[in-house]
Image: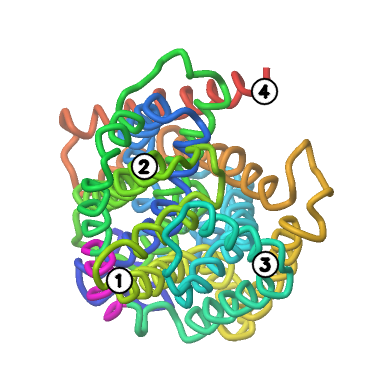
Amino acid sequence: MSDQRKSIHGTWSSRWTFILAATGSAVGLGNIWKFPYMAGDNGGGAFVLIYLACIFVIGIPIMLGEIMIGRRGRSSPANTMSFLAKEAESSQAWTLLGATGALAGLLILSFYSVAAGWAMAYVFGGFQETSAQAVSSEFDKFLADPAALLFWHTLFIILTVTIVARGILKGLEAWINTLMPMLFIIIILLCIYAMQTGAFLEGLAYLFKPDFTKINSDVLLAALGQAFFTLSLGMGAIMAYGAYMPADQNIGRTAITVAALDTGVALLAGIAIFPIVFANGLAPTEGPGLVFVTLPIAFANMPLGVLFGTLFFILLSIAALSSSISLIEPGVAWLVESLKTKRAYAAIGLGIFSWILGVFSALSFNLMSEFKLFGMNFFDFTDFLTNQIMLPLGGIFIAVFVGWVMKKKDVLDELQIEDGIIFKSWFFVIRFVAPVMVAMVLLYFFI
Ligand code: TRP
């Protein structure tokens, strides 16, 4: 039975807490920063449609699997995999899935922290410039300044490490509870602003009218990778959080709630941003700077814009923090359990690892901009390697583990569900649809 194993890190105090924590992990830069610029880089509507399909057909079923694995194992992803592999009388090599997942988390954190640093810097953005040119040249100037980028990157890692060192169960609950809804409200305000730009319909059409001629293997993989990234799937973050989930909580309903909130925030961010892009003659293909050159224009033009702008970037930074802690938690929990490392030392050690890699990401916008790996700068390369390769591969292995390695009766027992139509459909997706589709997208991209 699932509740025989207790996590040494504690359990969330209520059902609501798991939803908040998982939503805190899922909602972050991926929704507000990455989703819009990925949509813009990949042609808009067709990308969005495939992304949504990936969320529903692949993301939600795998999220269920990840939560289920985590709760059954009740420890860090690596030890959970080891325990469940034993339970299923399978190979201990599955431990590696937990370990590479923890590594993927640290790699993601390295560039995530650089972008989160931009959000923190924008808290002091001023929001006076109303022209697209001025805003965009400010951002370029900022990117060209290695000291500024390194300062904010360092600060963000320190904040992440501090929270994780204290234990993610403390403190986290309260602020996700109140701050996340506030972020949501400001995004709605931005959408209202977007309605008045005169390019609202153009923005909506760009986002929701698919142009199927734009679909190619790059777009498919980008949409798939974004689905994994935005739901925090494929590396054990949700698994690690699942370990702290109360035994009587319904996993299916929880996964759907988290995915719905996450997708809602991403779509609203897109609805707010693209009208501003078109109204100001900016290009959707602006890349990673897209939100940072569009939203300041909106804040400069709206009443109380300085207040809302400042608040928005504070909340975005906090949303990024509630995500970043889940990137480092799988590794930290593992060190604490297996090497009996003090939580603080584990967090600091892994934080330093991500910080060093992140330095290269920060410098890839200025001093090291000529340094290319497979044609990408260091920032883009780390992003590509993790989101479009490691996470989808992790997803395949998670699906295979749940569908083919675990005993079906254990899966049923942990989900506390009947072997009926709902379970059967999900199990079919986890065994066949999800792994085959992800594998096909990866193969199609590489061949
Ligand atoms: N989902 C987060 C975002 O959208 C980022 C994130 C947190 C993440 N934990 C993760 C991505 C684990 C992949 C895996 O900002």
Q: Nearer the viewer, mark 2 or mark 1?
A: 2
The residue beneath circle 4 is 446
Q: Locate the C terminus by quadrant.
A: top right
- The mark that comes first in sequence, 3 or 1, is 1
SS of the residue under disc 1? helix
- The disc, 2 or 1, on the residue closer to the chain's N-terminal end is 2
Of the residues shown, which amino acid type is indicated by label 4? Phe
Cα distance between the residues tagged 3 and 1: 32 Å
Determine the secondary structure under disc 3. Answer: helix
187 relative to 329 in the view: left or right? left
Mark 4 within 8 Å of ligand 1, using the beta carbon? no
Image side of residue 344 versus residue 321, left or right: right
Residue identifier under label 2: 279
Q: Which residue is mark 3?
A: 354
Vertical position of residue 294 compared to residue 430: above or below: below
Q: Residue at x 40, y 58 (%)?
A: 297
